Image (cartoon, helix red, strand yellow):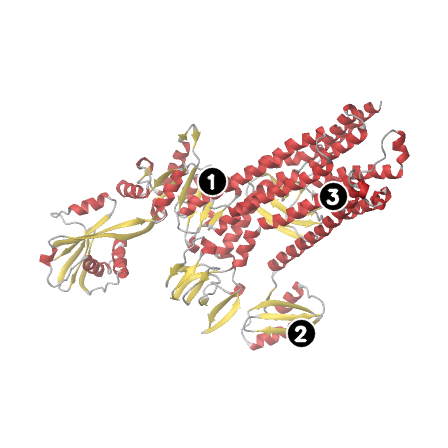
Amino acid sequence: MNKQTFAIKGMHCASCVYINEKALKAIPGVTEAVINLTNGKATLSSEAPIEGNKIIDAVKSVGYQAMIENNGTLDEKIKVEKAKELKDLRVKVTVSLFLGSLIVWGSFPGIMEVAPTLFKNYYFQFVLAAIVQFWAGYDLYKAAISSLRHRIANMDTLVVIGTTVAFLYSIFVTFFPKFFMNLKIEAMPYFDVSTVIIGLILLGRYLEAKAKAGTGEAIKKLIGLQAKTARVIRNNKEIDISIDEVVTGDLIRVRPGEKIPVDGVIIEGESAIDESMVTGESMPSSKYKGDTVIGATMNKSGSFVYKATKVGKDTLLAQIIKLVEEAQGSKAPIQRLADIISSYFVPIVIMLAISTFVGWYVFGSNPVFINAMLRSIAVLIIACPCAMGLATPTAIMVGTGIGAQHGILIKDAESLETAHKVNTIIFDKTGTLTNGKPEVTDVLLKSNIKDQISKIQIKNQEGLIQLAASIEKLSEHPLGEAIVKKAEKEKLQLIKVNRFKSLTGKGVEGVVNEKKVYVGRLLKSDSFADGENLKKQGKTVVYVYIEDKLSGLIAIADTIKESAKEAILTLNKMGIETAMITGDNAQTANAIAKQVGIRQENVFAEVMPEDKEKKVRELQSREQRFLFRTVAMVGDGINDAPALAAADVGIAMGSGTDVAIEAAGITLVNKNLMSVVSAIQLSKKTMKTIKLNLFWAFAYNVVLIPVAMIGWISPILASGAMAFSSISVVTNSLLLKKAKI
Amino acid sequence: MDKIIVSFFGVVSILFTYWFFFMKRIDTVRAEGTVNILVDGGYKPDRISIPYGQTTKLVFKRKDSSACLEEVVLADFKVRKYLVLNEKTEIEINPTKKGEFDFSCGMGMFHGKLIVK
């Protein structure tokens, strides 16, 4: 009995269930069809599996949609195919190495003396070798022959030529020993060579396939993050539906410990949410009404209701998956050379093997034919084009994968490669180095304030904020908003304001507790030394007057991100010069630069948004140690898009779901500036792995092919070296997973 | 005498190898809309001319069980796809640049070219 389960979209009543069940039962072969309305899932029982399109058509005929997962089945298919391939290889490796070892026992001087007579029998060896050659080696032959039809040579061609020569020679020796004896050549077959080579090459393939599966793990993990169901509120009822059926505008309830299904905005409740799986930020972030939540993240403590704003392929996670997939499909410029070499490599090795044979036959020592044959086989077998082909892509796959796990999204392999050369990073100021939201930083009271207050009690700084916030609540100025926020944060009660007036270019005023209060610029005759100092620090200062007497001041500034100082310091330590670009005035810009540790001469202030791009180009053309600089620009990805595009590497920093992924070469999904450091580190480490892989792959061939030509290495040893070579490259790429970034 | 014969055949074999692998005639297949590519010991056709600015569907069918050909990479279009054995895998591309673009297997051993005109 076969069972198939799938979702049906659009059902909302018992009659829908009935109609669909009837339609499904009508499909030939179906014995039972059961639909569960609460989860929208149908289960079919049948003698044999029913084709997906038959189910889709049946459900469609009654006006609904069956969600037969195509992607799921593709992944399944790949999984099944890979598992079969590995199992197949395992059996072949075991059998060929076992049979090979029997032949070795019967033919290797030193141990053959103690071997059973049967093992020493050439005909017996022939039977064992033939099994390995044509059963275990079947796929090698098939692949080699079909590529030869395209006039292409690959790994399999080399192995097939090498082992076939050894195998055919051995057959001749076994069946026509007299012919060789007449030529004064010892009639000894080399069945051990052909079998052990095939065994070891297949063992290499097996281990390589196992290791390679690990390089694509990150994407599978990302896909696995997706929630399967969502609890939506429709018609005042909470129902669990499949994630595919969630539409924008749906209200979704999330309880503690549950996964957030899709992207959206909280409309009721609050909670702490662990977003580490998507943003790489390890601390859970507190979310309140109006805050955005990201699909696939984990709700920790509270329960809340939110409105779905992005579903399906528009969610942040879906975009991340797409981006990582694309990046893994792209090629790093460093790979080009390896590509060119590997496309000429195999035919050249064949030519070298022929030259080796001729060379040893003409100039070598006796027995010339055997020496020449074994040496040319060693040349064919030792050559390893696979390692060259695997060197870059495996490292890029692991690198982009671990990036995504840390909230570092890399658009393509080229960006990943360029980032390791970056020696200058320009940061946008507002929203990148700073939080981008003005905050109250200082509150000062005028010393003689106590004399003035009678009805209005200003005992301390809080009193001043309370008063100013009460009035600013009625204005719409961003600076006013900062004061109101401060009051809210301190949980201060706002007081009723009468006769509110906005004085254009000056400030606001109103009557509070029968006293006239003004908040705004300094009025002409007054002076406040502390205010001037604060202004020099790049802060905006507003003054509070009570009954026309200056009572105090509030300084407001955009605050720097906590991570800014550490990030700049670390980058500088890494030898990377840091710069800042902003549209703000020089005073504010310099003050922020000083706080984060950017040198004064690297501050570009009062740069109009359209000129930021020019500044980037200007920096690129500045020489540093006789070389042009490689410049990265860090910005928000929306306003800075042209500057990001102009830089050698554009790094966009976003938060949550608003991130503009397409805008930059590298996108950071969190606000933490240390991620810039991590991105550079990731690039450096990935490039180090690639370079080591390529060096290994090239050096291996450049050194060992001549060694095999000279005759210092036996064919069996050559096959071991070759198998080890490609595995070591993949393993080295996998080691990247352990790298600290 | 045998040494001369071996040397002679050696030189001939090397020349043959060079001619066989490096001097093959490549035919360009002109495709519009959909093109079927057989993956069996290489790509057939392996030189495909496709129109600029239009979506072309490349339908790969892998008949070769060798792991080398299990993935196809179209690096310029940022596609790396697993080709399920004996099944059709569709890849849609819409070239926005003219020129020649390489496609290859996952390890870069087998190559094909897309010519965008």
Q: Which residue is mark 3?
A: A198
Q: Circle 2 — which element?
A: strand
Q: Chain of mark 1?
A: A
Quadrant assignment, res A547: bottom left
- Disc 2 packing (10 Å; few <14; some 14–19; many ≥20): some
Q: Is residue B108 visible?
A: no
Which of discs 3 and 2 lies nearer the camera? The answer is 3
On screen, A49 above or below A572? below
Which of the pair A134/A182 is nearer the observer? A182
Which chain's residue wears label 2?
A
Q: Position of residue A191 (x, y in %)?
A: 80, 41
Q: Quadrant of residue A119?
A: top right
* Residue at horizontal 77 percent and vertical 25 percent from the top: A364
Amino acid type, residue under disc 3 in the picture: Ile
Q: Chain of mark 3?
A: A
* Viewer-side residue, A87 vs A585: A87
Task: Nearest to the eye among marks 3 and 1: give it.
Answer: 3
Q: Residue A25, how many percent across, how many down?
A: 67, 73
Image quadrant in which you'd find residue B31: top right
Give the CA separation, mark 2 to mark 1.
Answer: 58 Å
Callout count: 3
Amino acid carrying label 2: it is Glu
Assess disc 1: are there few (<14), some (14-19) or many (≥20) residues with their C-alpha within 10 Å of its C-alpha: many
Image coordinates for residue A212, horizontal then vertical, percent: 61, 48
Q: Nearer the viewer, mark 2 or mark 1?
A: 1
Q: Is residue A267 left or right of residue A451?
A: right
Residue indicated by mark 2: A32
Q: Is residue A631 above or below residue A457?
A: above
Q: Which residue is mark 1?
A: A419
- Give the SS element for disc 1: helix
